Image (cartoon, helix red, strand yellow):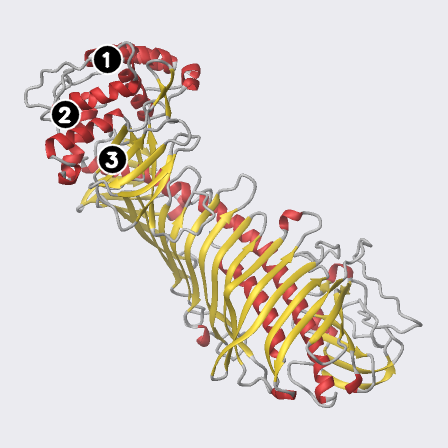
Amino acid sequence: MKSSYRILSLAIAAAGLLSISGCGGGNSSVLNTGATTPVTVTPSLGKFNVGTVVRLAKSDDTELVRGALGTDGSVTLNVPTSHSGTTIAEVLGDTNTMYYDEGTQSEQSFAKGKKLRAVMAILRATVGVTPLTNAAVTNLEKTKGSIGAAVAADIDDANAKVGKALGLGTASILDAPTLVDATTLTGKTLNVATAADQYALVLAALAKSAATGKTAADAADDLASDLKDNKLDGKDGSSATPTVVLASYTPADIGLHYKTAAAEFADSNSQTIAQEKGLVVVVDVTNFTAAPLSDLALVKAMFTELRTTLNSFSNTSRTGFLDTQAERVNLDLSNNVAPDLNKLNDRVRALSHSIQALEDLRTTGYAGNVYGNLYYYQSTGTNPLTQAAVITLSTGSPMSAWNGWGNYEMCFTDSLVAANVTTITCANANSSSADRANNQLKMMVFEVKTTSMTGNYTYTATRYNQPVYVMQHTFPQQGDQPYEFVELSGDPVLVSKDAANNPMPVGSGTAVKTTTGTGQSALTSNLALNGTFPPSGGASNTGILETTADTVAINVTRGAQTGTIVRYDLTGSVETKKLADQTLSVSLALNAGSYVEEDQANASTTGSVGTAAVLVGSAQTAANKFAGTLSIGSFAVDKNGNNRQPTSVIFDGSVSDTSVDGAGVMLTGKLVASIANYNLYDSFALETDSNYQQNTISFTGTVQAPGRPWLKLVLAGNRTGLTTSAFTVDYSYGIVSLTGSATSNTAPNAPAPVLTLSNQDGIQLSIDTANNTLTGTAAKGGATLANIVNSVINYSDLTSESL
């Protein structure tokens, strides 16, 4: 069955369509299905050592996930999305667990059985676990009986009380402090103007308050006992009337030790500030509660979020993580993946035609025109390659290949009798063969042999950049240049070299198929192609050899048939390699589950047509890796019955930055691209308001930027008119969520896009981007809290800042 060979080339061509999905995002090699929420945990007594175990649990202590600290002293744990409420973070002691003690300025053991905990009412993207958070957990267990009995307000109040008692004011003790170790002591890097550094100095002061012979861990235990009754008085608050004096630390000295800690760990300015202002501790925080942020504070917090998160992912200057990654990935796809796979597809297709021609000659003779193959006729001349009488087969024209809209093939056999043919030699030129810089066609010549018609073939393949001499003919001129495809003047010399005189690698391999039935009714049940091909070249037309031999190892198995639709299952691999830069090599892996479907209703007249392809596996270069499933379907022709193409492409998997020092797995989820009205689109007419392709694209998944938490992301865009488009965005991490929408119009003098955004706190932004300056308002509940003029935010409290 002829179509079995073209399935190979269809699969490779389909992989080239990855370029349509090149929009552009934790370094896990396992696909992230988006079913988890990342939480980065940073514990501190000082800094804990690598390998310290951290766990997250529900309020009833049911474990959600655990992991070990890395070299930076933190760990990101992926919590199932089914859980989002009260969560306990816990650091577990062990025989090898150590921490840097700011009091003793040495590494101390955090023994097996010891714990340091924190509790959050709502899952946060980042959380610190410190003696202060540990004290809040202990307080809740005493006042509420258990963490499970505490509601969100109880948890917020407990954390706020401890922060107030230790001089942190309204700053959240759940924020991660700067980690302190011996290098901090040497560098004196802490800055009291920074919340994380200020927190670190408070922890250092607590550690220094430990009694002689005691450690920071001992002081942490006593702090938890002390604050059970919401009073920082040095007495165990376990009972209603505390009387037991805690001996491990002296809370009254924490303020004094704060100044000492600043002198040892902070920069000179911070030392001065610490001496002048000190640390204001509050002995009794019984009546202190966590006050909600004001609406104005919520607005300011939202703008901070936009700068630190949204702006870091995408911005109008195109410098965000997704902006730069999208450009980098698209360049790699368009310059390497798609061109190389498409050119390799041409070679597989040409080999398929050569094998088909040989089969047709042996089974049906050379009379007549068999669609999808070559037109056969008996030559009166001789084969210039063998100088023997032959059967000549040809189709297309060199000029159609030169102009990029067709193919040209010319074949010769080793016998004038069709039934005796065992070798066929075919020269092929196609739409990617034109080397205009050197006025040449990059011809591919296949020699296919079989000892018997049992489905076993061997082949050699040679690429020629020089004109290939196959018959006497000079084609019409193109401009001032004659393109002589053939010129017989004695024995022809076929030179397989590039424009720089580099020899071309010769490809070779085997094609083995299993067939049921005979003649035109024969069906191929299995086809295996293994071998190499001459270089597929590159994106340029310099005539200089750019790649080494390409390799193909693909197995095709005929699967289920529904009506006239036949499915072919695929497994195998494809690889192209660049000579000058091996980092530009492209490899394609087809795993189980990959298949191509085609409609064979008109196979004997107008030919079979592809209807769907699903490729499971990966496409990879040194710079990027796409791993997952690529689904291509809904093939359609335009209004004129031309330009058949898929109108639905879905990529479900991950995109990784595999470059040196790259971002690793950066994007995980489902990308969908489609055309809604392609059958109504008139490709012969100008695009108008009633004649345009209604393209849509969406992404649902997660994205990871360096130094940022995993971001749950939903993006959608669709073309709504000739010049108009609409976009929506929805992202979230931890307790942060933001939704937005925008429209654009590329028509002359059209209004500039207006962006609307809202967040989890009910803040609404409306921003007009006209003239590259941003104007608009920020409001909550209909009350305007800020006006934006010329990219400057003017708040209702008369303060201002740049957007």
Rendering coords of residue 319 (x, y %): 47, 42
Q: Nearer the viewer, mark 2 or mark 3?
A: 2
Question: In the rendered image, which residue does mark 3 sit on?
Answer: 795
Q: Secondary structure at mark 3?
A: strand
Ranked by sequence position, the earlier of labels 1 and 2 is 2
Q: Would you name the residue on which mark 2 appears? A: 228
Q: Amino acid at mark 2?
A: Lys
- Counting from the top left corner in percent of width and height, residue 353 is at 68, 76
* Image height of 563 relative to 404, above or below: below
Above-or-below relation of 601 to 611:
below
Left or right, 98 with respect to 435, comes to: left
Q: Amino acid at mark 3?
A: Tyr
Q: Which residue is mark 1?
A: 255
The foreground one among 210 and 501 is 210
Q: How many marks?
A: 3
Mark 2 to mark 3 CA distance (whole Å): 41 Å
Which amino acid type is marked by label 1? Gly
Nearest the eye: 370 or 763? 370
Would you say the residues marked 3 and 1 are in contact, meaning their CB atoms lie under 8 Å apart?
no
Q: Is residue 562 visible?
A: yes
